[in-house]
Structure formats: C-alpha cells, structure tokens
Amino acid sequence: MSGAVQAGYAPPTGPDQPAPGRRWLRWLVAATVLWAVLLAVLAWLSVRDDPPTVREQRSLTQSGPVVDRAVGELLAAAGDGGAARLLPGDLRPGCRITPMEDGVSLTRAVEVVLPGDDARGLLQRVADRLPASWRAEVETTGDGPVLRADAGEFVTVQAAPPARTG
C-alpha cells in the first residue's frame, strides 16, 4: 500500500477531540480575561479608596493664603530690629501637577535688612524663631550661609544674605 486513504474513509477527528495545538490558545484567552477583570477590580478599588497621589492640586487662590501665612511667620521671626519690604510675586509656568496638566510655581519674596555683619548668626536667630514644625536649618554653601525651611503644604522658605560685589 502506498499510504493513500481509501475513498469514503474519514480520519478520527470528530467534535469530541480538540484539534491539536488549540488547548494553549484556550488557556491564553482565559488568562487574558482573568487579568483584565483583576485590573478592572483593582482600578475601581483604587479610585474609590485611595487618596490622590499629588496632594497639592489646588488653585492659586487656594494656595496664596498658605504662602502669605509663611511670609507672615518669616517676618515675625525676623523681628522688629530691621526693615522689611515685600517684593512682587512671581508666577512661573512649568510645574508638573500630573502628566495631563501643567501648573505654575508661585514665589513671594521678602527683603529684610537687619543690623549686623554676622550673616550666619542673623539667619540662625531667624531659624530659631520659626515654628519647630518647619525644621529650619542654616547651611553654609559656596555662596555663603543659607536658611532653608519647610513651611508645609509644599511651601519652601529660603533666606540668604545678598551677594556682595566688589
């Protein structure tokens, strides 16, 4: 015999036997559906229960008073032994709130002139008078002493003596 099939003879591949190589496809489809359902449930739970990942999603109207309060605390810590001057506010675009939304950065500056030549000592006295929750500290950098503090709610305080020329 040459291996040819006789006419009228059907090979044994009926509906009761799956086609070879199709079993892995069923498992792949089942695993994909299970994974999609799991992701949907986790996303729903996250949206329902988790707080936002970026706390500081507020408008300038909402954040302005926080910055003003920090400026007031800084002026109170500087004391009445000097002269203070508020400088104009500065809005700079480019702050990334989320990948979908741009924000702005608000900077308010205060110029305080205090008597004395010991810049580090003056900054240290101001740092000591700031609220303890701000964790104010004075560091010495290549440009001189710098006071840095965290006023909370994404408000940073920095103070430094003016750059000397000549």
Image (cartoon, grey):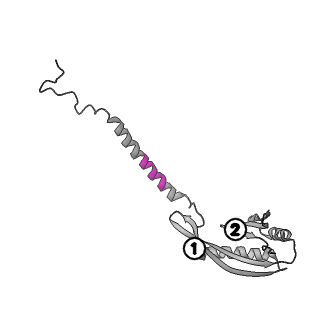
Which residues are drawn in magenta?
35-44
Q: Relative to residue 98, is residue 152 drawn left or right?
A: right
Q: Residue 86: image x %, image y %?
A: 72, 81
Q: Relative to residue 146, is residue 35 drawn left or right?
A: left
Of badges 1 and 2, the one in the foreground is 2
> Is the residue 5 above or below the residue 98 in the image?
above
Q: Residue at x 13, y 24 (%)?
A: 6
Residue of label 1: 59
Residue of label 2: 156
Is residue 98 on the magenta stretch? no
Q: Residue 97: image x %, image y %?
A: 56, 65
> Is the residue 82 above or below the residue 137 in the image?
below
Q: Earlier in the sequence, mark 1 or mark 2?
A: 1
Which mark, residue 150? none
Q: Residue at x 38, y 41 (%)?
A: 28
Could you tell me the amino acid type at mark 1?
Ser
> Is the residue 28 above or below the residue 12 in the image?
below
Q: Is the N terminus in the top left, top right, bottom left or bottom right quadrant?
A: top left
User: Which residue, as the protein is rendered here, is positioned at the far left?
Assistant: 7
Name the foreground residue: 87 vs 156. Answer: 87
Q: Residue 89: image x %, image y %?
A: 66, 78
Q: Secondary structure at mark 1?
A: loop
Q: Quadrant of residue 7?
A: top left
Q: Quadrant of residue 83?
A: bottom right
Q: Relative to residue 56, is residue 77 drawn left or right?
A: right
Could you tell me the amino acid type at mark 2?
Thr
Name the foreground residue: 135 vs 93. Answer: 93
